Amino acid sequence: MILTKLSAEEISALESTRMSFQLNQTHPLSCKSEELFDDHFLLSYLEGVKKEVQAPDLLVAASIFSKRYSLVVTLPALMMMTVYNKRMSWKTEDLVLTDSLSKEWWLPGIFHQHIVSYEINNENRLKQQENLFAELFAHHLSPLWVKLNKLSGAPVPTLWENTFSYIKWFYETVLPEKADPLRVEKDYEWLSNAEGHLYASRKNPFHPFWLDAKRHKEMRRTCCFAYKCSSDKIMCNSCPKK
């Protein structure tokens, strides 16, 4: 069944993942998601991110951008899937990065121009998950990460680990309190073990990081370079460079 309206509870839940229901675009880094797939635009955009977060180079700017962007692109859709059993249409042409939701840090929100969702039930859950992951990853984040790598040199595994770090936190800390823990665990496992083609990859890029999480290994495999934007240059506790 196709649904076009969200409940007040769903709207509140989505707002907690930085999804905005008002289109505010006054900041230079507010843009349509589809614009980011143009190399010239993306290069200029990364220069803007570099200036905004005081990064020393485009590689660091790209890594920081991937953290901010992957959070607002993935968490709202995964919230609807796991908590409310709905697959939101998540096409790049419908998504807009909004102004920062913080005055202290650059924390953009995401605005959806044409909200459409589909009911998920026991019979169609696998198919709906495959459709969602293809939109989220194979047709969105994966090609964008390749472009970031090409333009900045940011390692693709780092960009995927940046993405997974928020997903891990979401499924291990936030969602167990909002949905059936068994469904949370199953969705988290499926997300981390789904076939590579849903990520436009030979193998699932999340799988190694998920295995580390299952083994309670807190150390990241890659450095996100966030310390290079801080005045004290202190690395994260989970940084492999420590």
Image (spheres, grey):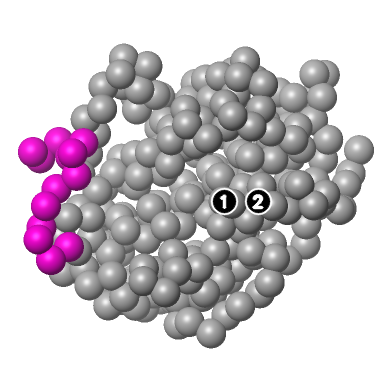
Depth check, front residue: 141 or 19: 19
Quarter of the image where one finds residue 148: bottom left
Q: Quadrant of the N terminus?
A: top right
**Residue ranking furthest to the right:** 1
Residue 122 part of the magenta segment:
no
Kindly identify the residue that appears in the image at 29 percent across and 44 percent down: 158
Above or below: residue 229 compared with residue 116: below
Q: x and y percent of residue 119 in the render? A: 83, 35
The Cα–Cα distance between marks 2 and 1, rounded to whole angstroms, is 5 Å
* Rendered residue at 45%/69% (across/down): 102
Q: Position of residue 43 (x, y in %)?
A: 35, 73
Residue under the point 67% across and 21% down: 180
Q: Secondary structure at mark 1?
A: loop
Of residues 132 and 109, the one nearer the viewer is 109
- Mostly what secondary structure, the magenta segment? loop
Q: Which residues are magenta?
A: 230-242
Q: Residues within 10 Å of mark 2 (few under 14, many from 20)?
A: many
Mark 1, Cα crowd under 10 Å, few <14 / some 14-19 / many 20+, is many
Name the kind of residue labelled 1 in the image: Thr
Q: Quadrant of residue 109?
A: bottom right
Q: Position of residue 206 (x, y in %)?
A: 41, 30
The numbered mark at residue 14 is 2
The correct choice, above or below, for 182 with respect to 18 in the image is above
- The amino acid on which the numbered mark 2 sits, given as a three-letter code, is Leu
| Any part of residue 221 in sight | no
Q: Which mark is residue 17?
A: 1
